[in-house]
Amino acid sequence: MSFIRPTLLRPVVAPRFVAAPRTAIAAFHATPKHNIMPAGPQVIDGTINDPAPVPEQNSKHGAYHWSFERLLSVGLIPLTIAPFAAGSVHPVLDATLGATLVLHSHIGFQACIADYFPMRNWPTLHKGSKILLNIGTAIVLYGLYEFETNDVGITEAVKRVWTA
């Protein structure tokens, strides 16, 4: 009986492994095929026997930078709640809230640039993105300064929108 089993199973198993032609379903696709972007430049400096380079120590990287980001994020909580809870609108508190929000956003966008456009793969795009981010941050800070000095300020604007 065991010599019959392989011959009986062969017609049942074999059609499952035959690939169906793909051209039959291509005519029904409504969207065009988009190619994926090619990988970034692949560069290897040196030989396999060269030691790995040791990066320079920088106080902006590592624990100090991370601690500053966390302190800034935690500091936003009372700065956001205090003007509404206390009921007083003070220009210094408003300016501190605006500057802290802009700085928090700036650090977040810097992290996005570092993650998505690394310096080793995209040096020109990395530098250009950082320059645009710095220009944008400066424009936003100037706009908040104008809003604080010549208009009602952030807290009063939020109060007016909330009660409108």
Image (cartoon, grey):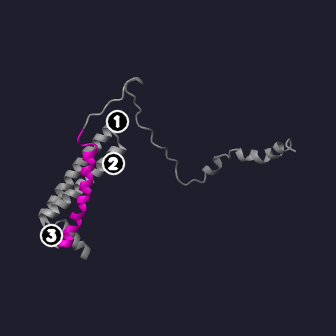
Q: Which residue is mark 3?
A: 89
Rendered location of residue 19, percent (x, y): 68, 44
Write down the quadrant of residue 151 in the picture: bottom left
| In the image, residue 133 lies in the stretch drawn in magenta | no
- Position of residue 156 in the picture relative to residue 8 (left or right): left
Task: Read off the residue under disc 2.
Answer: 112
Magenta segment includes 69: yes
Q: Amino acid at mark 2?
A: Cys
Tell me the chief SS of the magenta region.
Answer: helix
Q: Residue at x 15, y 61 (%)?
A: 95
Q: Which residues are magenta?
A: 58-86
User: Marks 2 and 1, how far apart in space?
Assistant: 15 Å
Q: CA distance from mark 1 to mark 3?
A: 47 Å
- Toward the right, the furthest residue is 1
Foreground residue among 84 and 145: 84
Mark closest to the chain's N terminus, 2 or 1? 2
What amino acid is at disc 3? Val
Three-letter amino acid code at disc 1?
Arg
CB-based contact (under 8 Å), mark 1 and mark 3: no
Q: Which residue in the protein does label 1 denote?
A: 120
